Image (cartoon, rainbow, N blue to C red):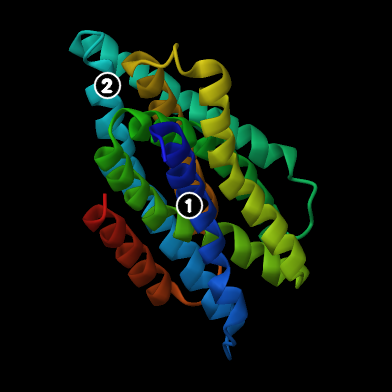
Amino acid sequence: MNNITFAFLVTTIAGLSTLLGMIPIYIKFKDTNKLICICLSFASGVMASVSLFSLIPESFELLITKLKIIPTIILMIIFVLVGILISSFLDKSFQKLNNKLYKIGIINTLALIIHNIPEGILTFSTTTANISLGITLALSIMFHNIPEGISISVPIYYSTKSKKKVFYYTMISGFSEVLGAILTYLFLYRYINNYFIGIILALTTGIMVYISLFELLPNSLEYKYKKSTIISFIIGFIFMAFFK
């Protein structure tokens, strides 16, 4: 198996691990509202942690190789804000949906597609250059793709009761990582550099921050389980800080 084939395999496994986020919908709980609350807040903590301990430092390290410190910080702030604006636009675009949980699931799917495409680019590029480093990166991505899958599957399922829709949306989100690998192989491989990836990571940070702090956490807090929300958020935050 050559590096290209192996890189596609690694990227596919990492991307489709999102489907493991469907597991909670197959487990019966007496209090489904508490389950929703816990899943949303846990995913929120994961995304906040990924943004703080992974995306921001990686973006800075890549951009600083091309720019001085002040331009690097300014550029990062600009693209983080662009990411937040993109997510805010998606949010407003679906304001007409009456079912709040369904809206969360749809927004998370679209936002995570935007997030997963560059993630697929990064995983594929890294693995083709260094198999060992690529595998390490893919394992890290798998750990945070599972909670991201939860952030799609739980809202979609408990708003529609359709496992087919859950599979459809979760699969699309996960496969977008494979799409990133395909785009890299066909068009982008020769153009990818530290500057490009650094900007993409800053943009992704904004998307993740918005989803975490303006969608998942506030909606979790709307349920009566405030203590569970806080504990689940902290567990998710620490979980990804450990596996970053």
Q: Nearer the viewer, residue 150 or 234?
A: 150
Q: In this view, does 157 lie above or below 201?
A: below
Q: In this view, does 155 lie above or below 145?
A: below
Element under label 1? helix
The x and y percentages for residue 200 are 44, 25
Q: Nearer the viewer, residue 98 or 79?
A: 79
Q: Label 2 amino acid?
A: Leu
Number of numbered discs overlaid on the protein picture: 2
Q: Mark 2 points at which residue?
A: 62
Q: Can residue 125 be seen in this view?
A: yes
Element under label 2? helix
Q: Give the left or right position of residue 11, taking residue 183 as reference.
A: left
Q: Which of 11 and 55 is in front in this view?
A: 11
Q: Residue at x 59, y 87 (%)?
A: 28
Q: Can residue 219 be seen in this view?
A: no
Q: Earlier in the sequence, mark 1 or mark 2?
A: 1
Q: Residue at x 55, y 29 (%)?
A: 85
The x and y percentages for residue 67 are 25, 8
Q: Residue 13 carries which label?
A: 1
The x and y percentages for residue 17 are 49, 57
Q: Label 1 amino acid?
A: Ile
- How many angstroms separate mark 1 from mark 2 (CA)? 25 Å
Tell me the crowding category of disc 1: few under 14, some 14 to 19, or many 20 or more residues within 10 angstroms, Cα based: some
The x and y percentages for residue 236 are 35, 62
Mark 1 or mark 2, whichever is nearer to me? 1
Screen quadrant of the N terminus: top left
Q: Residue at x 68, y 50 (%)?
A: 106
Q: Quadrant of residue 63?
A: top left
Q: Give the left or right position of residue 60, taking residue 14 as reference.
A: left
Q: Give the left or right position of residue 208, taking residue 157 as reference.
A: left
